[in-house]
Image: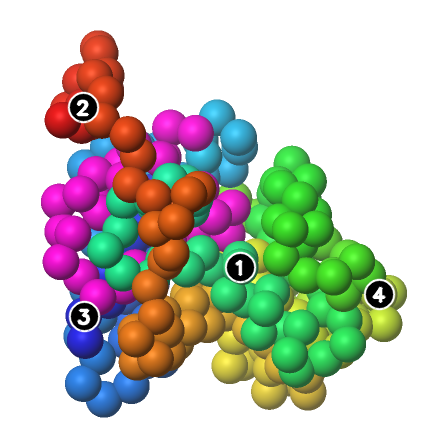
Amino acid sequence: MRIRVINPNTTESMTALIEASARAAAGPGTVVEAVTPIMGPASIESHYDEALAVPGILRAIIDDSGADGYVLACFGDPGLDAARELASGPVAGIAEAAMHAAAMVGRGFSVVTTLSRTRGRAHDLAARYVAPGVCRGVHACDIPVLELEHDPAARKEVIALARHALERDGSDAIVLGCAGMAGFAAAASAELGVPVIDGVAAATVMVQSLVTLGLRTSTREEYAPPPAKSYTGLLREFTRS
């Protein structure tokens, strides 16, 4: 089985971090390949960033349509529905996978994310993925995405915020709201004494399980391949015939 893990931003060091997390979670016989898009933002911290990340994500699927499954490793799950229209195998977003996993190991969870401006997107996704009241709060550490890897205090600050979230929200679990936090989960869980979910690991295992079960995205109606049509300008290469 081969799973292609797509880092929707163009920062190679984050791709390496994401690949390490996915490989650690994957089972024997599963080959994990993390890729960086050929176009897109250096990090994703706004709706504008998310929108401009989607063409690179879709290109990474078009260029390797033979993978058994795909993971979109950005907590905003940008382009997830479009990716499912194109992909030959199942596709999971890391917010989707993390929230589903958290809902299975506790009655309620809190999300710890990066910038305050991204909290609305996390709330929107929670409303789509889990029942009302299961996501009990979204908390921002206000550390930019690319600083998570280089700021020596970042892990400590994220764990402190997670502790505050548990107490304030009465949650049973923590969802890490950024792929750049992938390396924090084990230490945070050990220190806090609750499940702490890294979406990269959760999505990798979810895709692996779907492939093992022989399941792929339905092509009936909404997730059918997109209709053939021409695109112009910078999107000319996405024309479908």
Q: Amino acid at mark 2?
A: Thr
**Residue 205 shows up from this direction:** yes
Q: Is residue 47 above or below residue 122?
A: above
What span is colored magenta in the figure? Answer: 51-78
Q: Is residue 146 left or right of residue 35?
A: right
Q: Which label was assigned to residue 169?
A: 4
Upstream in sequence: badge 3 or badge 2: 3
Of the 4 image quadrants, the one containing the C terminus is: top left
Of labels 1 and 2, the one closer to you: 2
Residue matched to label 2: 239
Residue with the most extreme top position:
233
113 displayed left or right of 57:
right
Circle 1 packing at 10 Å, graded few (<14), some (14-19), many (20+), is many
Residue at 13% across, 58% down: 66
Label 1 sits on a secondary structure element that is: helix
Asked which quadrant contains residue 167, the reply is bottom right
Q: Residue at x 59, y 68 (%)?
A: 100
Distance of label 4 from label 1 (alpha carbons): 20 Å
Q: Secondary structure at mark 4?
A: helix
Compared across the picture, whether 235 is left or right of 190 comes to left
